[in-house]
Each structure stands twice: as C-alpha cells, then as structure tokens.
Image (cartoon, helix red, strand yellow):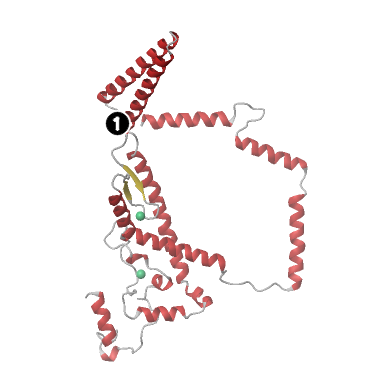
C-alpha cells in the first residue's frame, strides 16, 4: 500500500486496525519502538535522500519516517528526553557514525572522480596537419625576425621595428593556435559536495551556464549530500562545544596529588640533557634529507626514486 494511504488509515483507525481484536495491545507507538527510524529522530535519515539516483543507499532498516503522520509526535517525545538520557539511547552516536562513514566514502569517491577528470582534461595530441600549420606560422616569425635584425644592422631603425612587431604578431598567432588545437574537447569538474561529474561551461552562454549550475544545486544528489555534510558538521560542532558528561570536580586531596604529578612530569620533559637535544636535532636533519657528513644520502635517493616513478608513469 502506498505509504501515505497507510499512514492515513493508521491515523483514522489506529495502527492496530489489522490486528485481531483480542490481540490488540491498545498501546500507541513510542519513539523507541523498533519500527521508528532512529536516524530520523536524531536529525536525518540518509536513506530517503537519494531514491532513484546514483547515490541511492537502498532501504532504511527502520520503516517509520517523517512521512508517517505519527512521526511528529514521536519526534517531540524524543526531543523532550534529557541530554543525559538521549546519550544512553545512543541514537545520535549511531547517526554520527553512519554520516561520518558516508561522508568519508563520498570524499574518497571525489578524489577518484577528480583523477578521472584530470585524465579527460589533458591537452589533446597534435595531428600532423596541426603541426604543419603551426610550423608554417613559426617559419614566418623566424623570417620576420631575421629581416628585423638585418635592417637594424643597416641602421634602418624604423624598418627593423616594423618587422619586429610583425614577428611578435606571428608568435602570438602561433601561441593561440596551439592553445586551441590542443585544448581538450570539454573540461570536466567534480562537485566537492556530491562527487557528480560536471562539464565546465565557459562564459560564452551565461544563461545556459547559470541554468546548469542552478539545476545541479537543486538536484537530489547535491541536496542530499549537502544535508548529510551539514548535519554531520552541526553534530560535531555540538559535541565540541558541549561535552556530554561534565566531570565531577576532583576531591581536594586528589587534585593536589595530581598537581605534584604534573610538576614531576614537567621536570622530566624540560630539563633534558644537551646531549638529548643534540640527538633530536640530528634525527630531524636526517629526516629532512640533509645527509650531513654522509653526502648523497636519502635526499638523492629520493630524487632518483621520483624520476624512476615518473618514467614508469609515462611508459604506461
Ligand atoms: Zn531511516
Ligand atoms: Zn554536487
């Protein structure tokens, strides 16, 4: 049955409308009942966000959500619970865990998508035809330069300047043609929020560009991932600013004992021998790769390794 219809019947006839009379409990739902979505209570059920999109997360393990007419009352019931008791239920902790996992997975996907985009956005290889066109312009530039120099030697400053200007124009023409011939057919970008692959539109058609951006920002995927990230950030912020359990103040004796402990700890760290410090410094230098007396140490090996890897990469 359609959710809305079922919800309506639930409201009109009670949730136990299909339960035989003698089996009815007569109790109304509680927020802690197993069918109530705990993620939704705690702030956001991500499962409903991406229906029929590439980000579809499948079905939620809980069946009762905000569309249900009873949900609002259950939500109020949950919100009335004290912070301390809420922590015992653990719904927020579970939601935090789920959202953290989802955001982390999406961030990884975004990294992969960006790598793909970079591949696509690399300059195109030039054809023999393209090269010929470019070489012809280059040749004209060289001729103009030579003429400019020859005239300069003859003392014809104006003539020399004229050809120098011409050579510069050819150089610019060459650069522009090279740029247009090697430009990728389309430049792709990746949305930092939802990982969607998007074609970067230039400003030649600002209306089209604005519409595409608007469509993206109104899309299910963008809105869903934005909600996940915003909820996650708000939960993290709340945790930072309000620690769940304020610790009871320590009894006086214990706290003085702890101070002494801390002082001893401090002594151990700050009054170290100069030999210790010397040793630390030399470790650090070695890590940075300034090999000290052993010249050609890690640093050079590192550089070699980079070159090796680049070569490998190009071969592939
Ligand atoms: Zn749910
Ligand atoms: Zn997006």
On the question of residue 282 being in view, the answer is yes
Does residue 121 sit above or below 56 in this rendering? Answer: above
Is 130 left, or right, of 296 in this rendering?
A: left
Question: Residue at left 46%, top 70%?
Answer: 92
* Residue that appears at 33% across and 27% down: 173
| Residue picked out by circle 1 | 181
* Residue 261 percent coordinates (x, y): 75, 61
User: In the figure, is residue 229 to the left or right of 221?
Assistant: right
Q: Quadrant of the C terminus?
A: top left
Badge 1 element? helix
Residue placed most toward the observer, 64 or 144: 144
Quarter occupied by the N terminus: bottom left
Count of labels in the image: 1
Kindly tell me whether residue 124 is visible in this rendering: no
Number of other residues with Cα within 10 Å of mark 1, as a class: few under 14, some 14 to 19, many 20 or more? some
Percent across and percent down for residue 164 are 40, 19
Seen in the picture, residue 214 relative to 182 is either above or below; the reply is below
70 and 138: which is toward the camera = 138
The answer to which image quadrant residue 188 occupies is top left
Splitting the image into four quadrants, where does ligand 1 fall? bottom left
Quarter of the image where one finds residue 179: top left
| Camera-side residue of 39 and 232 | 232
Residue 3: % across, % down: 26, 75
**Residue drawn at the location 53% of the way across and 66% of the way down:** 239
């Amino acid at each position: 049955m359609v959710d809305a219809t079922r919800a309506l019947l639930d409201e009109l006839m009670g949730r136990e409308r299909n339960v035989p009379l003698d089996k009815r409990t007569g109790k109304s739902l509680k927020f802690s009942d197993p069918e109530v979505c705990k993620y939704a209570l705690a702030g956001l059920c991500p499962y409903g966000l991406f229906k029929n999109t590439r980000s579809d997360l499948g079905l939620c393990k809980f069946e009762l959500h905000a569309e249900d007419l009873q949900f609002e009352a259950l939500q109020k019931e949950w919100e009335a619970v004290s912070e301390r008791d809420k922590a015992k239920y653990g719904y927020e902790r579970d939601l935090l865990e789920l959202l953290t996992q989802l955001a982390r997975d999406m961030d990884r996907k975004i990294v992969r998508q960006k790598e793909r985009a970079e591949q696509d956005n690399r300059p195109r290889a030039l054809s023999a035809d393209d090269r010929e066109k470019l070489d012809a312009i280059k040749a004209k530039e060289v001729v103009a330069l030579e003429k400019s120099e020859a005239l300069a030697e003859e003392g014809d400053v104006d003539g020399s300047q004229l050809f120098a200007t011409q050579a510069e124009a050819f150089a610019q023409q060459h650069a522009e043609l090279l740029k247009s011939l090697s430009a990728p057919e389309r430049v792709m970008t990746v949305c930092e929020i939802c990982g969607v692959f998007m074609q970067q539109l230039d400003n030649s058609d600002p209306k089209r560009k604005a519409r595409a951006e608007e469509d993206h920002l109104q899309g299910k995927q963008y809105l869903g991932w934005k909600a996940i990230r915003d909820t996650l950030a708000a939960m993290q912020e709340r945790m930072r600013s309000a620690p769940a359990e304020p610790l009871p103040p320590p009894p006086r004796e214990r706290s003085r004992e702890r101070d002494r402990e801390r002082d001893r700890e401090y002594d151990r760290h700050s009054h170290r021998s100069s030999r210790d410090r010397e040793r630390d410094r030399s470790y650090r230098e070695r890590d940075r790769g300034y090999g000290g007396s052993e010249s050609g140490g890690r640093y050079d090996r590192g550089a070699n390794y980079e070159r090796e890897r680049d070569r490998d990469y190009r071969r592939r």
